[in-house]
Image: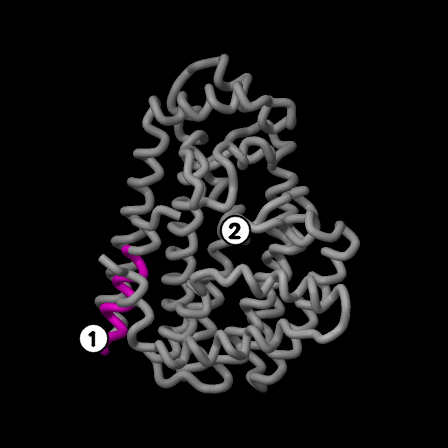
Amino acid sequence: MDYLSIIKQPIAHDLDDFIALFQQALEHEEGMLGSALNHIRQRGGKRMRPILMLLMARNFGQISSVTQHAAVGLELLHTASLVHDDVVDESGERRGQASVNATYNNKVAVLVGDYILSTALLHVSYTGHQRIIEYLAELGRTLAAGEILQLSNIQNQAISEDVYYQVIKQKTAALFEACAAIGALSGGANEEEMQLARQFGQNLGIMFQIRDDIFDYFDSKEIGKPTGNDMTEGKLTLPVIYALNNTDFESMQTLARKVKAGTINSDEIAVLVEFTKQQGGIDYAEQKMSEFSAICKSYIAANVKEKAIKDSLTAYVDYVVQRNY
């Protein structure tokens, strides 16, 4: 099934308008900055976050310039955070393309990220909507706090599923939550409707991150990061957390501690990945996605009236769970 076509169908023209506005925001005529921004523009992507914001605005009213500038502001904020994250993580690749820090250097990447962040603030100001401005400002704080929590968790020897969810709620899930909530606000939702939309977005974001984490246990040329990369960066994700917490293999606990210490090698990662698969870690993560999917679909059934939007959001949930890259 072509989920993306179904998802985009009700907002196709509005999505084209968003893409044009977003690309314009990343234009600069001069030198290295212009070159770096053009490098980022070439990444493209499926635009799942702005699509969610546009769909939620349509569900509660209409897509306006407020919606579009808020969507651009949020996507720019997200883009800036990725540029900075690649510096923090010393990543050489992003979506199959060389990262800004790898193409230029860390100093340039940090400054480019700052420029994009300032551009995000400019577009948010164009909404003239105080609540949306506050929400996006708070999102920036949340994303930074989530990144610091993730870094501090690497030093924490405890292997906790609760902490895993705490981290992703302040990172990936926070972005989806903001898209749903801000989209609803821009469409005219009341406080109760906005809060329900916010929770829907958070659940979507949790599913999205779990699926991303599962990818790291398999080989695929379509994924913009190599298998085992999370463990190389000191991160233990849901599948291996489940496997470690539900078995009693001291040798695997030792490898997990080496992940957190940053001393694990590729052969040891392969052992830990295989252990995770054999002990049901992937199955458990997929089960959790199914549980969040059911909650999301209950929200759609109760809160989305127009058939085209209902079909689109349902396809969105299914796509998040079933995508293969």
Residue 109, relative to residue 287: is it above or below? Answer: below
> Which residue is nearer to you in this view: 223 or 308?
223
**Quadrant of the drawing holding the N terminus:** bottom left
Within the image, what quadrant is residue 298 found in?
bottom left
Q: Which residue is mark 1?
A: 307
Q: Is residue 156 above or below residue 29?
A: above
The residue where tag 2 is placed is: 95
Report whether 266 appears left or right of 155: left
- Secondary structure at badge 2 equals loop
Quadrant hosting residue 301: bottom left
User: Residue at point 60% right, 84% down?
Assistant: 126
Rendered image: mark on residue 6: none
| Magenta span | 305-318
Q: Amino acid at mark 2?
A: Arg
Query: Label 2: how many residues lie within 10 Å, few (<14), some (14-19) or many (20+)?
Result: few
Percent x, y for residue 292?
32, 51
| Residue closer to the observer: 313 or 248 | 313
At 60% across and 55% down in the image, what residue appears? 82
Three-letter code for the amino acid on which mark 1 is drawn: Lys
Q: Position of residue 306 (x, y in %)?
A: 23, 78
* Disc 2 versus disc 1: nearer the observer: 2
N-terminal-most mark, 2 or 1 = 2
The residue sitting at the right extreme is: 107
Prevailing secondary structure class for the magenta stretch in the rendered image: helix
Residue 260: quarter of image: top right
Labels 2 and 1 touching (C-beta < 8 A): no
Q: Is 307 on the left or on the right of 81, as rendered?
A: left
Q: Residue at x 38, y 68 (%)?
A: 197
